[in-house]
Amino acid sequence: MFPPLYAILDPSLAQRPLTELAEIWAEAGVRLIQYRDKRSSAAQVCTQTKELVARLSASGALLILNDRPDIAAIAGAAGVHVGQDDLPVDHARRICAPPRWVGVSTHNLDQVRAAAATSADYIAVGPIFPTATKQNPDPVIGIEFLREARRLTPKPLVAIGGITLDRAADVLRAGADSIAVIRDLVSARDPAVRAREFVAVAAKAIADRNTS
């Protein structure tokens, strides 16, 4: 099963070292973490990625790197996530061959259809709700979009954008396989407790959906 919680590490928001935060999340049950760094140099991102991979190796948590398939492969990450303005999925796949994952962001149904026809391992859709973690966010698409996207592809769907603990269950019941969370995890007073809360809510929502 695709991990139901997709935690995103962003150094511009984190209030403690990324390796420490990643370990806390992994110990709390998070099995999929993305490292997203839009500001650091390639050398710095590579060094940080290697450190995160090493710290997470014993936990079984997978590390996905945002934007850079070359660094993902060099640093031993589990995969890469690309956006609409990054390398196309099939180009990224040449660098991150299986078993590494390639994920792709989408913001409308045409992009979902296009992504479904690629070798992408999962498709991110959003922003579901308004978000402040991007400087120029795409238009909000809402929960109903998930139901429409679900009909277009069997690939795992990762919902992203403004997802809080209170909203998580509704997003998963609408058809998402996983919820990507940034601010509500990174800025939590106790990130371990908040991560466990998300994991529990996600597991229950998916179980309820599968039995309904």
Image: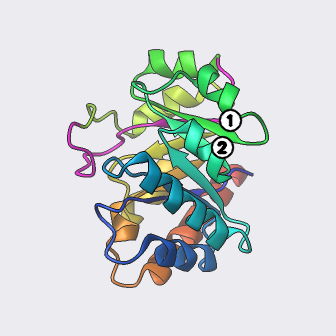
Q: Residue 202: name its quadrant.
A: bottom right
**Of residues 131 and 103, the one drawn nearer to the viewer in this rendering:** 103
Q: Is residue 59 left or right of residue 67?
A: right
Q: Is residue 24 left or right of residue 31?
A: left
Q: Is residue 134 magenta?
A: yes
Q: Label 2 amino acid?
A: Ala
| Residue 20 x/y as whole percent | 49, 79
Is 26 rendered above or below residue 145?
below
| Residue 192 x/y as whole percent | 49, 82
What residue sits 55% from the left and 17% below the top?
Answer: 113
Please tell me the numbered disc located at residue 116.
none
Q: How is the image coloured?
A: rainbow
Disc tally is 2
Residue that carries the numbered disc 1 in the rendered image: 96
Is 141 rendered above or below residue 80?
above
Is 27 rendered above or below residue 87?
below
Q: Is residue 193 left or right of residue 184?
A: right
Q: Are marks 1 and 2 in contact (CB under 8 Å)?
A: yes
Q: Residue 29: name its quadrant.
A: bottom right
User: In what element is the residue under mark 1?
Assistant: loop
Q: Which residues are magenta?
A: 118-136
User: In what element is the residue under mark 2?
Assistant: helix
Is 71 rendered above or below residue 115?
below
Q: Residues within 10 Å of mark 2 (few under 14, many from 20)?
A: some
What residue sits 43% from the left and 46% below the top?
Answer: 42
CA gap between label 1 and label 2 equals 6 Å
Residue 117 can be seen in this image: yes
| Residue 168 x/y as whole percent | 45, 58
**Of residues 25 and 5, the one drawn nearer to the viewer in this rendering:** 25
Residue that carries the numbered disc 2 in the rendered image: 73
Decide which of tag 1 and tag 2 comes sooner along the chain: 2
